[in-house]
Amino acid sequence: MPSPRHVAASAVTVALTLALSACGGDTNETAAAQSSMPGMSGGAMGSMNMAAFEGDGLKQTVDGYMFTKLTNTAKVGKPGQLSFVIDNPKHKPQKDFTLQQTKLLHMYLVRDDLTEFQHIHPSLDMKTGTWTVPIKFAKPGPYRVVIEFEALKDDGNFDDRILGDKLTVPGAYSPVKYSPITGSNNVDGYTVTLDPTATVHGPNMHLKITKDGQDVTDLQQYLESYAHITGFRKDTLQAVHVHPNEVPPYKTDPNAVGGPNLTLMSLFTDPGKYRLWIQFQTNGAVHAVPLDVTVS
């Protein structure tokens, strides 16, 4: 008998809408970051740490699960739709998934030059196994699309997988020269400070959020956490994903708040330069702040 965490997609699909929305709210969480911008303890949520998943977003197929039929109808300045299918090891569309942080699937899109990033949540057609989501792009060029999911199996267990594929948005591609954003960055009036260096499987990293020089202590739950950090390695676009060790005491409590200091487990498996997008929510709005770290 599956635990309450093992919820079949068929039982929750009716509650999902085909919308581009923020986790924990109805605001649009699509975030663009440009290089020109300035400069597990306590119940930590290991289930969504990429280290607990098989794959790093560089492969289209992992353990028999295949990210296939990726189609995009959007062009720069013209919204469209992304669609795709996840084939299971039986070579059939996977149709049952478990909820992970309130969503059946998390999708990340990053442009090859690390200047554009989106985190969105497609919806599943249970009849066909096709995922769809509205999409729009600010810039043309090559992108990597990464999906993260938990496939529910017949025996009630589930497979955690991270798959990736390439996507090209039509138009002339003029890559922006990589310019690290290190130490701190200010977006939407919020200043986020993060250790500029880290080590593979090293000690915790430290993050702080302030606004107008004052500590931010009203971080709301976002994907059942106080922050959501997704990163991509320069050049390879290898994905990494981590949450703060600090978690809401009760995930169902809408009044639980956190901040300003958060600690992040270093889940890097390979050295290199990484751009991280730190997403957090205040007053019902999701903010996305890009920062770079060098991992040794």
Image (tube, grey):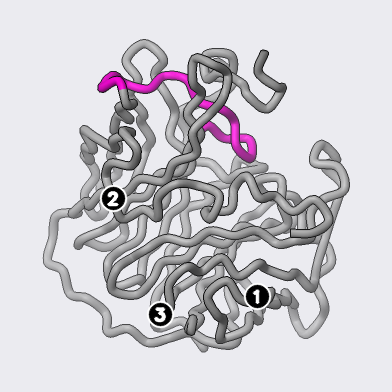
Q: Earlier in the sequence, mark 1 or mark 2?
A: 2
Magenta span main SS: loop
User: Which is nearer the eye, 123 or 64?
Assistant: 64
Residue 180's label in the rendered image is: none
Label 3, on which residue?
Answer: 272
Label 1, on which residue?
Answer: 189
Separation of residues labelled 1 and 2 (CA atoms): 37 Å
110 is higher (above) or lower (below) than 215:
above
Give the residue type at disc 2: Lys
Q: Earlier in the sequence, mark 2 or mark 3?
A: 2
Secondary structure state at the residue bearing disc 2: loop
Q: Which residues are magenta?
A: 90-104
Q: Residue at x 57, y 35 (%)?
A: 103
Q: Residue at x 79, y 54 (%)?
A: 247
Please identify the quadrant where the N terminus is shown: top right
Separation of residues labelled 3 and 1 (CA atoms): 29 Å
Task: Estimate the x, y position of residue 70 in percent, counting from the top left.
Answer: 23, 38
Could you tell whether 115 is left or right of 150 in the image?
left
Could you tell whether 223 is left or right of 290 in the image?
right
The quadrant where residue 18 appears: top left
In the rendered image, residue 53 lying in the magenta stretch gets the answer no
Q: Check whether the beta carbons of the residues at disc 2 and disc 3 lie within 8 A of each other.
A: no
Crowd rating for badge 3 (residues with CA inside 10 Å; few <14, some 14–19, many 20+): some
Label 2, on which residue?
Answer: 59
Q: Check whether the beta carbons of the residues at disc 1 and disc 2 lie within 8 A of each other.
A: no
Q: Residue at x 53, y 75 (%)?
A: 200
Task: Estimate the x, y position of residue 208 in percent, counting from the top left.
Answer: 73, 76
Tell which tag, 3 or 1, sits nearer the viewer: 3
Q: Residue at x 56, y 27 (%)?
A: 98
Task: Estimate the x, y position of residue 76 in percent, counting from the top left.
Answer: 23, 55
